[in-house]
Amino acid sequence: MTRGIGYLIAAQFVSGLADNALLIVAIARLAELGDQPWMAPLLKGVFTLAYVVLAPLVGALADRWPKARVMLAANALKGAGCALMLAGADPLLAYGLAGVGAAVYSPAKYGLVVELAPPQQLVNANGWLEVTTVAAIILGTALGGVLVGPTLVQALGTAPAGAGLAVGGALVVALGVVLVLYGLAGALNLAIPRPAASVAERHALPPGALQFLQRFAHAQRTLWRDALGGASLGVTTLFWGAGATLQFVVLAWAQQRLGLSLSQAAYLQGVVAVGIALGALAAGRWVALGQALRVLPLGVAMGLAVPLLTLVHSVALAAPLLAAVGALAGLFVVPMNALLQHRGQRLLGSGESIAVQNFNENAAVLAMLGTYAGLQAAGWPLPWLVGLLGTAVAAGVALVMWRLRQRAARGLMWSAP
């Protein structure tokens, strides 16, 4: 692994750590303000919505300026959201600004991977990024819990707010810690070396909003119509939409079928995350970029494994099953991400192709979560929902495999990227 990739992975971990800790602190701030519990999921909604709405802009920005500097500016936006919350702004507004920073950060981050890592190391680099992302989710959530937990609240809960600050006590300390983490991530961004000019090609920005949209629409068509790009974009879009829904399915299933509390059910989500990390490491070690399409059957297997949850009634069986599902997910999605990045850089620009990916994946997250919520409201039993989710994943990946075989039979694609 090159020094630049090492700094990039470190910066991603620290920034992700802060993002996930900030979510927990924002939920605590909503509770402090006396808002209704149903407002907490809206935090995730406004954060995700930024990826969809800003996709035409952020990809072009990532390809216009050095990506490490774009990441630095994105961390500054996240820190500004944290500071707004510290000053008493509405948590939805403040966390939404952090979401804008995250939307800017993502295409620059993944685009920089393509610029810093040669093609033969791209799967390995993506594997390590996936591992650190999972670690940041787990540890960031745990850090947020500590920062708003009873020990710190009891020690500082009656402390006065600082001058000009609308929050006091433990939340001041919590938000201060998150700000420090964003500052550290920014310092790591500055340490990332610039890629060679021949690798990091710069693209001029479109002159107006209409041109931004036209360029983004062209990027969408280009990537979807490419055999390898369209296949990898299709399966990763399906994967992330289903993965976000699976989080809520696991929580509901663990409480209804296993009799666990919400906090205990959350531990099973951690088991899935550990499985993903292990699968990602295995993919980075044993799957080359030219072999990426060979992991597609693992996506079918992952989808077929999900309905097995309905047959399990003990934690002793649930934990290894969820770990296996996570491992299949990591083995499947990391090579697909690497293939998509590789084709995106060839066809478009690395930042713009990641923006297309972010748009599709996060639109799928919103659509599938909305469908899940609607079916729940309509009274669908949980086993039906679990079966529908798994079947959709398996059928979607199988359809992509069938289309690739059809194109290969007509000589319309290549055997390797």
Image: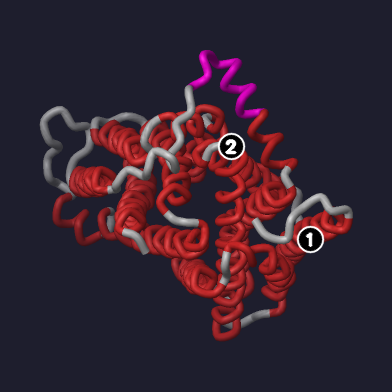
Find the residue positioned furthest to the front: 198
314 in magenta:
no
| Residue visible at 64% across and 33% down in the picture | 219
Query: Which residue is nearer to you in this view: 386 or 125?
Result: 125
Q: Dominant secondary structure of the magenta stretch?
A: helix
* 10 Å crowding of disc 2: few (<14), some (14-19), many (20+): some
Q: Secondary structure at mark 1?
A: helix
Q: Amino acid at mark 2?
A: Leu
Going from N to C along the chain, the mark reached first, 2 or 1, is 2
Query: Which residue is nearer to you in this view: 199 or 173?
Result: 199
Q: Position of residue 32 (x, y in %)?
A: 32, 42
Query: What mark, if any, has residue 348 been given in the picture?
Result: 2
| Residue visible at 47% across and 61% down in the picture | 130
Q: What is the quadrant of the C terminus in the image?
A: bottom right
Residue 63 horizontal side relative to residue 212, left or right: left
Q: In 3D space, how far apart are the residues under numbered discs 2 and 1 (Cα atoms)?
A: 24 Å
Q: Position of residue 328 (x, y in %)?
A: 61, 71
The answer to which quarter of the image holds residue 406 is bottom right
| Residue visible at 59% across and 43% down in the picture | 346
Whether residue 388 is visible, yes or no, is: no
Q: Position of residue 108 (x, y in %)?
A: 43, 41
Q: Is 405 located above or below residue 87 in the figure?
A: below
Task: List the residue tagged with mark 1.
Answer: 401
Q: Position of residue 94 (x, y in %)?
A: 36, 33
Residue range corresponding to the magenta coloring:
205-217
